[in-house]
């Protein structure tokens, strides 16, 4: 196995362990053991454990930004833009369940400039979401007395996906996004034709 393949194994191991045990609960020895190499050999591929955390978090941050920026730039109705924005976010989470968990919970373990860079990307992402919501208000589609809380609720719903979404289940990430958008846009009282048994896309929790 080449250096690139070995490094990918190390990053994969770090993603899994950081998501399960947390950044501070994971040691270099743990990562090396899961990667199948000696602890000392790990440093031939990385400088510090924080290098791994930053690479994981930064990669997910870029995916979130790129996917949402593409939606914001499109000519869509306010409802379509909201639905596509939610689907874009959920798509990133569904494709990166371990990494999304690390992004949500462990990024604050970064220090100094790295933490500031990720904070800046998170701020830019929230600003893009604010554009989605403001567009709906300006169009007259959304009536929101508190846009900040609307953004927070929407992102909280999408971010929590890693806890219960089952990629092997019956519902695709897009289908889940559509159902969640129905609830966020129209509330829990709306009658829906898909009421029925609990979808297998949802894990038992």
Image: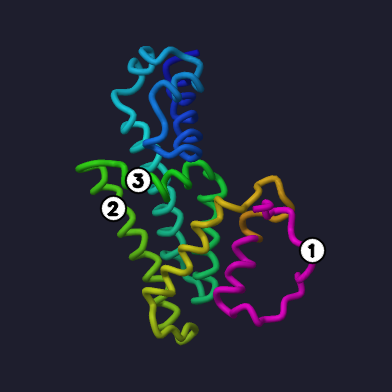
Q: Residues within 10 Å of mark 2 (few under 14, many from 20)?
A: some
Q: Write down the residue under mark 1.
A: 197
Residues packed near mark 1 inside 10 Å, few (<14), some (14 to 19) or many (20 plus): few
- Identify the residue at image location x=76%, y=74%: 193
Image position, residue 201 (x, y; %): 69, 53
Asked whether 105 or 132 is in front, the reply is: 105
Q: Provide residue 194's location: percent of width, then percent of height.
A: 76, 70
In this rendering, position of residue 184 left or right of residue 32: right
> Which x, y percent locates residue 15?
47, 35
Report if the CB atoms under discs 2 and 3 are less than 8 Å apart.
no
Magenta segment: 176-205
Circle 2: element type = helix
Q: Nearer the viewer, residue 143 or 187?
A: 187
Q: Secondary structure at mark 3?
A: helix
According to the image, label 2 marks what residue?
119
Q: CA distance from mark 2 to mark 3?
A: 9 Å
Judge from the rendering whether residue 159 lies leftward or rightward of residue 25; answer left or right.
right
Q: How is the image coloured?
A: rainbow
Question: Principal SS element in the magenta part?
Answer: loop
Neighbourhood count class around disc 3 (C-alpha, 10 Å): few under 14, some 14–19, many 20 upward: many
Q: Is residue 192 magenta?
A: yes
Residue marked by disc 3? 107
Distance between the alpha carbons at the discs numbered 2 and 1: 40 Å
* Of the image marks 2 and 3, the number of the one nearer the N terminus: 3
């Amino acid at each position: 196995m080449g250096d690139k393949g070995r490094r990918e194994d190390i990053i994969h191991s770090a993603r899994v362990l950081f998501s399960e045990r947390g950044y501070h609960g994971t040691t270099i020895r743990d990562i090396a053991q899961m990667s199948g190499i000696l602890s000392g050999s790990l440093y031939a591929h990385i400088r510090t454990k924080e290098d791994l955390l930053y690479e994981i978090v930064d990669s997910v941050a870029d995916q979130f930004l790129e996917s949402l920026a593409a939606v914001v730039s499109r000519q869509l109705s306010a409802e379509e833009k909201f639905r596509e924005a939610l689907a874009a976010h959920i798509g990133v989470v569904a494709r990166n369940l371990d990494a999304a968990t690390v992004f949500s919970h462990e990024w604050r373990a970064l220090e100094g400039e790295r933490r500031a860079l990720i904070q800046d990307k998170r701020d830019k992402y929230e600003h893009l979401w604010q554009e989605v919501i403001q567009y709906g208000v300006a169009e007259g589609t959304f009536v929101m007395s508190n846009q900040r809380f609307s953004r927070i609720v929407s992102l909280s719903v999408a971010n929590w996906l890693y806890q219960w979404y089952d990629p092997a289940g019956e519902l695709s990430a897009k289908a889940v996004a559509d159902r969640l958008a129905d609830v966020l846009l129209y509330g829990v009282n709306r009658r829906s034709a898909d009421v029925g048994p609990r979808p297998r896309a949802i894990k038992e929790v």
